[in-house]
Image (spheres, rainbow, N blue to C red):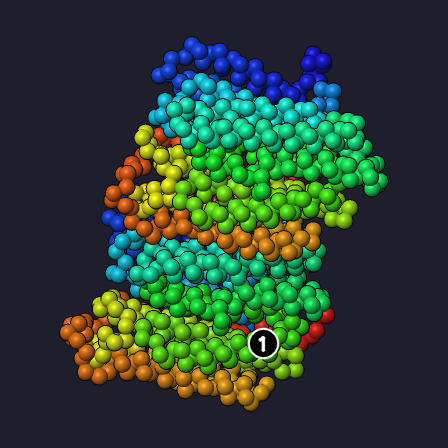
Amino acid sequence: MSLPYLSLSIWVPIVAGAAVVAAGWRRGDQRAELQRRIAMAGAILGFLVTIPLYTGFNLTAADFQFVEKAAWIGRFNINYHLGVDGISVLFVLLNSFITVLVVLAGWSVIESRVGQYYAAFLVMSGILNGVFAALDAVLFYVFFEASLIPMFIIIGVWGGPNRVYAAFKFFLYTLMGSLLMLIAMLYLYGKSGGSFSIVDWQRLPLALGTQVALFFGFLFAFAVKVPMWPVHTWLPDAHTEAPTGGSVVLAAILLKLGAYGFVRFSLPILPDACRHLAPLMITLSLIAIVYIGLVTLVQTDMKRLIAYSSVSHMGFVTLGFFAMTGGAPTAYGVEGALVQMISHGFVSGALFLCIGVMYDRMHTRLLADYGGVVNTMPRFAALMLLFAMANSGLPVTSGFVGEFLVILGAMKVSFWIASLAALTLILGAAYTLWMYKRVIFGAVANPNVAALKDLNWREATALGALAVAVLFMGIYPVAFTEVMHASVNDLLRHIAVPKT
Amino acid sequence: MSALMTYAPAFPEILLLVGACAIMIADLYVKDQAKGLTLWLAHGLLLACAVVTLALFAGHFALGGKPRLMLGGLFISDLLSHLLKFAAYASTAVTLVYSRRYLADRGLLRGEFITLLLFSLLGIMIMISAASFLSIYLGLELMSLCLYAMVALNRDSALSTEAAMKYFVLGALSSGLLLYGMSMVYGATGSLQLADVSRASALLAAHATERSFLAFGLVFVVAGLAFKLGAAPFHMWIPDVYHGAPTAVTLVIGSAPKLSAFAMAIRLLVNGMPELAQDWQEMLALLALLSIAIGNITAIAQSNLKRMLAYSTIAHMGFMLLGLLSGVVGGNRLSAADAYGAALFYVIVYVIMTLGAFGMLVYLSRAGFECEKLEDLRGLNRRSPWLAFLMLILMFSLAGIPPTAGFYAKLAVFSAAVNAGWIWLAVAAVLLSLVGAFYYLRIVKLMYFDEPADTGPAIDVAGPPEMRALLGANAIVLLLLGILPQPLLNLCFIAIQAL
């Protein structure tokens, strides 16, 4: 409890990233092996410093814990104010955990500009921890925006053939959203009499009209990140073109920023606007779940398929947040959505790693080029089956818990919303298992598949770790939900009180 | 002694004038191969001026920072003037370091460049400390005439000569507009001194007829000012001059003169006509919106880096104006210090960014090769990851992405605009800055995503070590200010508060 663990979780990876670059000073890729080791050490250390956040977490307190506060820009009353509650703490852990896997996954695959690759990931890992830990709006914004820079570079430098287009689309789309959020924040700053503290803003009374305007300011930023239909189109491009590690971080962490923004900003600061606009948000979520689910079915590129499935799954998250009854979302809905976010981090990350494993060997992502992989890669096929099942929401996997809770929450609001949302169980199973069937089963499709080698130990470690996580979360979700309870209940009570 | 000390606030100007004349004469005896000596003399002179200014700032601050009028009301000495002068010395010194090899390679490193630069700095300082229409105009002309000559320094280049002609003709026109406006205001208020003008215009502003007469003069003053700032629709000269001038001279034009243009705006509008704030704020709002729109949108179409940065300058001046136009809300000046401080911070950060960006172009240029096309940066990360990283910081700072200083500059002016109720303007500016992000990103793309072209001129990225170090420091400062902006922000607000 004595160490500033949150600061460490932010700065350890960033410093490690700088060290990786420094190790390659004027030598570049000749020092690649050393750089990989430093990156690995940095990532593991970065993960280790987040563990006390979980073990030392007070389950009964709804307040922010591990709070650090120091004046940063006194003139604007901006503070270096960090803290986590039951909602955000798990994402810090998730992010640091995924970073280790990403470093592992790129080990033998990335051969050019190795140092820059790892530095970008480590710096991004620190920045993302900062987003989840920031309690000052400007600090949040700085981290939120800064995360674009490494991702832009990652997609643009190590991405696929259409990487430049994808990198620009990613950057400009998300920047547009966040700039409008900046104006909303500045307005709140003026309204609150000169405070950027998120906690202060939550107590700020606001007229409904103002709330609605601000809600849209925040909505653009978060909807693009989630991504919600219809501003999701950057995601398939970014995912498809990004290198494996980039796709994993995008799916596992970056997509969570938007949903996290809803819980941290929109719901507690603008509860009346959320109530007022809940039908809109529910509609958009359902469109994402059903329509994007259908779109997913017809994809021919594996990465695109998983990307669309992410959009569909994130629709569940927003549904959980905005399916309101009695003036507030249900505890099932919110906890389900949070569980879904974490589960999706594991599952989609794992699926992108799986695709990466195949892509490294075959250099194609098209479903048509595969078939019969189980014959040459049996261990891989077994692991991928688990993740495919989790993606379609099979009980005992993490995917089930979140979806079930969200549907339960939605059922309290309306039977029809719940039934439409439940369609995902059919659609999700259809597109995931159909993809699995076409890639893994059947006769060996071509000589390239016949020449495939099974997982090496690095890949097996990364996927194995995720498999354990997916199963553990499916069997014993309480380990995750008990952390959230106090904060979620507090949030729900807060939302239920009108601010106007 | 005490009679001498009454002139103490003008010591930097006096020192610079004497020093520049001495250097001009000394330079006649310095051989062409040894121009480094003149450069060192110039650096020494700047350092001496900086020390004096620093002493003045400290002394002034200790005495509570009240502005002091002197020289018969022509000259004002306040914290803002000391700060801006200090920034102008630093920017000039950096310019000298950056341009040395570039000019030497092209046979342009002559005494003229250095003397003209020093005299233009003198003009800038006079503008910064001007307390009367007369001294503003004198300083402006001194600066402008030096700059016209510097643009044409490369006599054999048709492009430079054309740029100098355009600059001169349009500059003279804008000076005419400014003078015309000043004469109208003089006619209405009966004084050239800004303090008197302020008092008289406060009385006149209450009467509709007199007010419209004043506003009429104000239109011309603002137009002249907009021209000097390079704000649209008075921006036409900027791309041509930036493009046509030798890059080292573009570096000069793009940096310190912006500080003086800002000072001129503060002196004329904030000091001189605060009662007419309603009128000039609306004019500035239009100028700001047009500048941001035209600057950012047109920059996308440029294939020449210098032109692109020229349009980006126009856009940045528009952002800076957002701060200037947010000071007075419905006759209430409570948030004035915040707004003008934000604009001051913006302009200083902008000068640091411009120095870095043009400095990079100067650094990458060689004898017989001008680095001025977008293509010339292709694959820079392959040739030099360090330089590419520096340019990356510069570009993200120009685009206003955290964690760089450019973000806080934008944050400060947006915050001022939103607090002053200019929400629609802030939203428009924000959306247009998204457009702007595109062309800065394109540079990053060229440096990082693309491979160096085999056919292009092979650029060797080695350069003078002192320039390399300074360029690194220049970009890193932006990153450091991005992480800890507090010191500079505070300095800006202290300087503005004492206005």
* Residue depicted at x 57% and y 43%: B232
Viewer-closest of A12 and B399: B399
In the figure, is residue B325 to the left or right of A117? right
Nearest to the observer: residue B97 or residue A375:
B97
Front position in the image: B291 or A218: B291
Q: Nearer the viewer, residue B300 or A127?
A: B300
Q: Residue at x 60, y 77 (%)?
A: A278
Where's residue B194, x and y in %? 74, 30
Up the image or down, B408 lies above or below A420; here it is above
Give neighbour class at mark 1: few <14, some 14-19, many 20+ (Cα, 10 Å).
few
Quarter of the figure with residue B50: top right
The relative height of residue B127 versus residue B238 in the rendered view (above or below) is above
Judging from the image, what secondary structure is the residue with disc 1 in?
helix
Q: Position of residue A116 (x, y in %)?
A: 34, 52
Residue at the (46%, 19%) spot, across then down: B112
The picture places residue B353, in percent across and down from the top left corner, at 49, 40
Residue A66 appears in the figure: no
The amino acid pointed to by label 1 is Leu
Q: For the point 41% across and 25% down, which residue is it?
A: B154
Tell me residue B245's x, y (percent).
44, 31
Q: Residue furthest top?
A: B29
Residue B142 shown left or right of residue A287 in the figure: right
The residue tagged 1 is A280
Number of numbered discs overlaid on the protein picture: 1
Res. B107 visible in picture: yes
Does residue A391 appear to the left or right of B271 in the view shown? left
**Rendered position, B332 above or below A93:** above
- Give me the chain letter of mark 1: A
